[in-house]
Image (spheres, grey):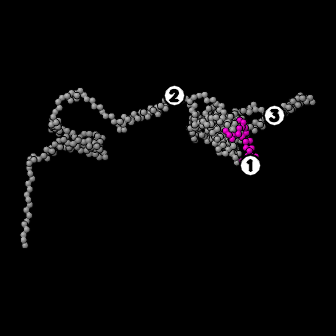
Amino acid sequence: MLTLISATPGSGKTLKAVELIYECLNSGYVVYSNILGLKVPGVIQISSQEDWRDLDHFRRQNIEMLKTPIAVFYDEAHEHAAFAEKDLLKNYQIDRSDYDLDIDIINLDDSLSVTQKKQRIDEINRKYKAALDIKKEQIREIGTALSMHRHFGFDIFLITQSPKKLAAHILADVGTHLHLRRVFKMKRATIYEFPEAHATVSKAVRDDAINKTIWKFPKHLFGTYTSTEVDTHKQKIPLKYIIILVLVFIGIPSYVARSLWYDPLFGHKEKPVMVKKSQEIEETKQPQTTSQEMHKPVLNNKNDDLQLENQRIAIIVESSTDCYAKNSYGDFIDISVDECKKLSSKNNRMSFSKLKKEQYLQDNISVNNNDTVGYTQPVYPSETTL
């Protein structure tokens, strides 16, 4: 599989590659890499312009290792002429010492005219240019042949700062794209995994990642390679994010707790503080009445009782469409339907008639407490003798 690892400088892309190298070694791979100063036992060092197709020579020499998998890690892959979007072969030259020697021999041959010498030198230069073009095409084939790398038992890892620095046909062959994003210079990064390469990894693209992982930098791997980036920045979180964190973890919970504390249903029930007025204080100074005077009932005026009785709701009649109230005399009482239904559902709020209660008590009190009930003994027929 062709795997692309991208990240801005200092985001841990090479460190992630070293971690993957250990995973490949543990899985039985033969690993090649051009990572600068790599100190991992078992990894074979290669140049940055290496042709990965030439790295399986050991399998051709030893048939027992024919099925041994190979992993190749190209660090700063955009510097490889076969992978780069930029034409790095523009100024590429091959050894032309043999061609220059032939040109020198032609110039020293006095038997040749100037025209003949020029024709032969031009022919030698054409041969050199043809050889140079062939060599450039061979280098480009290193990249175009990546579409067949799985058939040869290779896993290729390309590490770059930006996918845009790689050629389009290289990105088209990528099967897994790992993009690392590090914020606030923290010792961790978020790894976004995609099933294909993305030239630009924007926020919208990151949201479509098939997998997101918070990856903590493995400190034990820091000294296994030479880092080209010097981390001169200390970890620093912007003030606005600190304020947001304070509000989320302190402000909101405090507000919720305060709301629940004063909630009338679930909150704290504070006992009302009884404040005595000056009038009540003075009343305490006055002489208290006797217990008989305190418990002496206060009789209401009969006219007032009758007026209250006319206004008292004694009957509630409720149906699916209507609800009305009547007093104890059967007269309608003017109340709304909603209020009528509330009284019907909670009829314990309806008061009793004081007037009827007093009359009932008065009618059932015996006038003469000394009256006795007479009793006449029954007379049974006497027995007769036969």
Question: In front of the other: label 1 or label 2?
Answer: 1
Looking at the rendered structure, the kind of residue marked 2 is Leu
Of helix, strand and loop, which one carries label 1? helix
Task: Return the disc, 3 or 2, that comes first in the chain's sequence.
Answer: 3
Residue marked by disc 2: 239
Task: Return the disc, 3 or 1, that comes first in the chain's sequence.
Answer: 1
- Identity of the residue drawn at 7% across and 68% down: 383
- Identity of the residue drawn at 20% across and 29% down: 284
Instruction: Tell me: 334 left or right of 202.
Output: left
Mark sitting on residue 128? 3
Task: Please name whichever residue, 116 or 148, is drawn nearer the observer in this view of the structure.
Answer: 148
Which corner quadrant holds the C terminus?
Answer: bottom left
Looking at the rendered structure, the kind of residue marked 3 is Tyr
Which residues fall within the magenta stretch? 40-65
Question: In front of the other: label 3 or label 1?
Answer: 1
Task: Report whether residue 228 is seen.
Answer: yes
Of helix, strand and loop, which one carries label 2? helix
**Residue 242, position as x, y percentages in the image:** 50, 30
**Residue 317, position as x, y percentages in the image:** 26, 45
Residue marked by disc 1: 63
Instruction: Tell me: 247 left or right of 295.
Output: right
Count the numbered circles shown: 3
- Which image quarter: residue 379? bottom left
